[in-house]
Image (spheres, coloured by chain):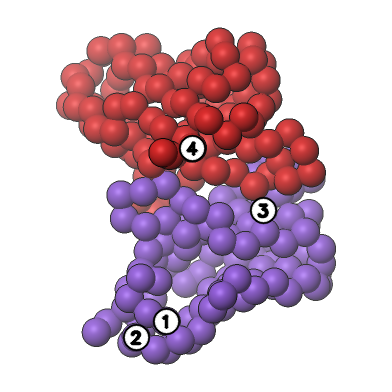
Chain colours: A purple, B red
């Protein structure tokens, strides 16, 4: 079946640094979604992407739907402590099912 | 008030016991989902429902069953719990329309099977 490879698995950065993470697949996806999960809570939708090449921002977050439709990127600028959490990508595949990546755990050092 | 609620939030049970996890939503969404989250494995779909009485198997449905008796409620049952079902369980909802793949998650239920 279709699979998503999300990287990196975890990141340790200094407050104020920019962050970049991505999801790739050998399959084509029609929609890409990015979620954030805070400790003890459920994932919350950050950004949804519907067209190849689409670049969408939500505050300090920017995500892109890759031109090949096989990848997506999420960037966070000027990280702050509340950015800590797990970030998940998700893709809508050819069988109309949502598949989640395994997550990128973001740690911010004081 | 939360749009998607799950009860209980935490549960410890013993092997062989029957367990039911409840999910309720006030978003008016038709579609509801149950996921399981294990460390390092992301979210895996157990069952989903597009309408009342509609039930579909997900990626890992063995050992689980669900019931959708009303639009706002979707319950997950473990008929005979086993230790490898220890995990964090999430309910999610989405609308029927063009943004049907934007899912809204509940706060989760942490289940421990001893």
- In the picture, measured across the screen, residue B14 lies left or right of residue A92, that is left
Q: Nearer the viewer, mark 3 or mark 4?
A: 4
The answer to which of marks 3 and 2 sits earlier in the sequence is 2
- The local secondary structure at tag 2 comes to loop
Task: Indicate which disc residue B3 carries.
Answer: 4
Q: Chain of mark 4?
A: B
Q: Which residue is pictured at 55% across the width and 22% down the height?
A: B72
Label 4 with label 2: CB-CB less than 8 Å: no
Q: Residue at label 2? A: A15
Alpha carbons under labels 3 and 1: distance apart:
25 Å
Q: Which residue is pictured at 78% across the width and 71% down the height?
A: A54
Q: Nearer the viewer, mark 3 or mark 2?
A: 2
Q: Residue at label 3? A: A91
Residue A93 in picture, x, y percent from top left: 73, 48
Mark 4 Cα-neighbour bin, 10 Å: few <14, some 14–19, many ≥20: few
Q: Chain of mark 1?
A: A
Residue B82 in picture, x, y percent from top left: 29, 23
Alpha carbons under labels 2 and 1: distance apart:
5 Å
Alpha carbons under labels 4 and 2: distance apart:
32 Å
Residue B59 in picture, x, y percent from top left: 57, 33
Q: Residue at label 1? A: A79
Residue A81 in picture, x, y percent from top left: 33, 76
Mark 1 Cα-neighbour bin, 10 Å: few <14, some 14–19, many ≥20: some
Alpha carbons under labels 3 and 4: distance apart:
24 Å
Can marks 4 and 1 be said to lie on one chain? no
- The local secondary structure at tag 1 comes to loop
Q: Tell me the quarter of the picture where residue B69 sits.
A: top right
Q: Which residue is pictured at 66% across the width and 68% down the height?
A: A72
Label 3 with label 1: CB-CB less than 8 Å: no
């Amino acid at each position: 079946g279709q699979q998503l490879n999300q990287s990196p698995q975890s990141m340790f950065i200094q407050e104020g640094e920019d962050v970049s993470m991505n999801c790739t697949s050998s399959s084509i996806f029609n929609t890409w979604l990015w979620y954030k999960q805070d400790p003890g809570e459920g994932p919350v939708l950050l950004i949804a992407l519907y067209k190849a090449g689409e670049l969408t921002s939500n505050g300090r977050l920017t995500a892109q739907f890759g031109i090949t439709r096989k990848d997506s990127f999420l960037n966070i600028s000027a990280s702050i402590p509340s950015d800590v959490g797990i970030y998940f990508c998700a893709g809508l595949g050819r069988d109309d099912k949502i598949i989640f990546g395994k997550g990128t755990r973001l740690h911010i050092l004081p | 008030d939360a749009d998607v609620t799950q009860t209980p939030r935490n549960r410890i049970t013993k092997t062989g016991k029957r367990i039911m996890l409840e999910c309720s939503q006030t978003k008016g969404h038709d579609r509801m989902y149950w996921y399981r989250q294990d460390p390092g494995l992301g979210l895996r779909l157990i069952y989903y429902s597009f309408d009342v009485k509609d039930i579909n198997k997900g990626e890992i449905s063995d050992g689980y069953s669900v019931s959708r008796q009303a639009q706002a409620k979707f319950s997950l049952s473990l008929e005979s719990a086993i230790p490898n079902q220890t995990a964090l369980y999430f309910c999610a909802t989405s609308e029927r329309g063009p943004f049907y793949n934007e899912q809204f998650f509940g706060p989760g239920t942490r289940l421990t099977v001893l």
